[in-house]
Image (cartoon, rainbow, N blue to C red):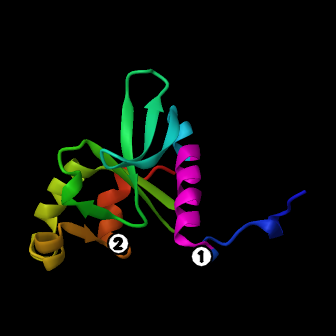
Amino acid sequence: MFSKKDRIQYANLNAKQKETYNFQKFSSILADYGFATLKLNDDWNGADFIAQHINGENYLKIQLKGRLTFDKKYIGKHIYVCFREDNDYYLYNHDSLLDLFLKEFNDTMAKSDSWMVSGVYSFPYLSKRLKILLNEFMLN
């Protein structure tokens, strides 16, 4: 029915298709950690989807992003953020990592117009330094 040549090219997908693709990929990865996921129709308390652990007690509100991103509107909402870079998948607690990054990147991130005025800061790609800082948040 399908062969390897039928695989889609991520770069050829539109934005909505990429979001769906990434949700499915993250759902698959999170299943390996004991989570079932539920896609939300709208951002509920900042989350694109919910991940419920098999223990029945732990759940994560997760925002799906295209890259490493921080946003002031997520502060205090217990949001986790997931994103992919190439074939690496990351999941982090927004507020915990934000605290670290505001200290670590005080001169660039914390003092940027993007963060101070717009309340959003993202990294277009992961440098070696960023990959080291994010190593513990890689899921694969």
- Toward the right, the furthest residue is 1
In the picture, the disc for residue 11 is: 1
Q: Position of residue 46 (x, y in %)?
A: 31, 49
List x then y, in percent, for residue 67.
39, 67
The three-letter code of the residue at mark 1 reads Ala
Q: Position of residue 76 (x, y in %)?
A: 17, 45
Residue 118 lies left or right of residue 19; in this view the side is left
Residue 63 visible from this viewpoint: yes
Going from N to C along the chain, the mark reached first, 2 or 1, is: 1
Front residue of 133/36: it is 36
Q: Residues within 10 Å of mark 1 (few under 14, many from 20)?
A: few
Query: Which quarter of the picture shows residue 50?
Result: top left
Cα gap from disc 2 to disc 1, whole angstroms: 23 Å
Mark 2, residue position? 128
Image height of 55 relative to 101, above or below: above
Looking at the image, which residue is at 37% across and 38% down?
A: 60
Tag 2 secondary structure: helix
From this view, report whether residue 112 is shown above or below residue 60: below
The stretch of residues the image draws in magenta is 13-28
- Seen at 51% across and 31% down, the residue is 34
Left or right: residue 15 versus residue 47 is right
Q: How many marks?
A: 2
Q: Quadrant of the N terminus?
A: bottom right
Q: Is residue 32 magenta?
A: no
Q: From what the image shows, is residue 57 above or below residue 112? A: above
Say whether residue 87 is visible. Answer: no
Give whichever of 72, 88 is nearer the camera: 72
- Front residue of 24/99: it is 24
Which SS type dominates the magenta stretch?
A: helix
